[in-house]
Image (cartoon, rainbow, N blue to C red):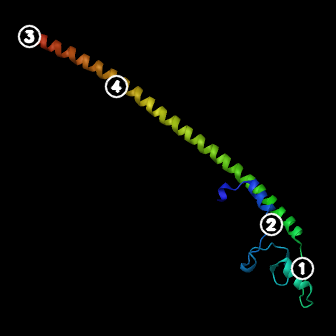
Amino acid sequence: MIQNLKSHDVEELMHRPVMCGEKCHEKETFEYYCKQRMQSLYLSQVRHFKSQSTHHGGYTGSREEHRMQIAKVVEQAKTKIAHFELQVARETELFNKSREDIQAARDKVRTTIEELVRIFREHEMAMVAKLDEVDEERQRCHTMQ
């Protein structure tokens, strides 16, 4: 999954609405962040808490501010993704070059062996011919005696 992540995927994720991770609010978009409670609040909750004077700490960061922070992180992620894509491309190039070198070595082994076999066959035929000559000469000598 992460291997297939491209920079345009990150861009798409950045423009998606930020949804709540809490079970009871999973269909609501993130609107504000409560410092005191360290939990995400939603527009309906914000309206409720704004009307109550007992809530301390206030709200910081609108959705747009969080989007800007996310955009910064996304840019950093894009840079890293581009770096990793370049590394993957280099590794792929080296891998392909290695496979080409191995295939060239295989071909060289095959042609060398074929050449050696040809030389040995020629030598075999020459030796057999020489042995045939020696055998014929011995037969003539034997016949003459």
Contact flag, marks 3 and 1 (Cβ < 8 Å): no
Q: Tell me the CA gap for discs 4 and 2.
A: 76 Å
Q: Which residue is mark 4?
A: 120
Q: Which residue is mark 1?
A: 59
Q: Nearer the viewer, mark 4 or mark 3?
A: 4
Q: Tell me the CA gap for discs 2 and 1.
A: 20 Å
> Which amino acid type is marked by label 4?
Phe
Q: Is residue 101 above or below residue 31?
A: above
Q: Nearer the viewer, mark 3 or mark 1?
A: 1
> Which amino acid type is marked by label 3?
Thr
Q: Which residue is mark 2?
A: 17
Q: Which residue is mark 3?
A: 143
Q: Position of residue 25 (x, y in %)?
A: 76, 78
> Of marks 3 and 1, which one's residue comes earlier in the chain?
1
Residue at screen point 76% across, 53% down: 8
- Kindly state the secondary structure of the residue where label 3 is placed: helix
Quadrant location, the C terminus: top left
User: Is disc 1 surrounded by few (<14), some (14 to 19) or many (20+) residues within 10 Å?
Assistant: some
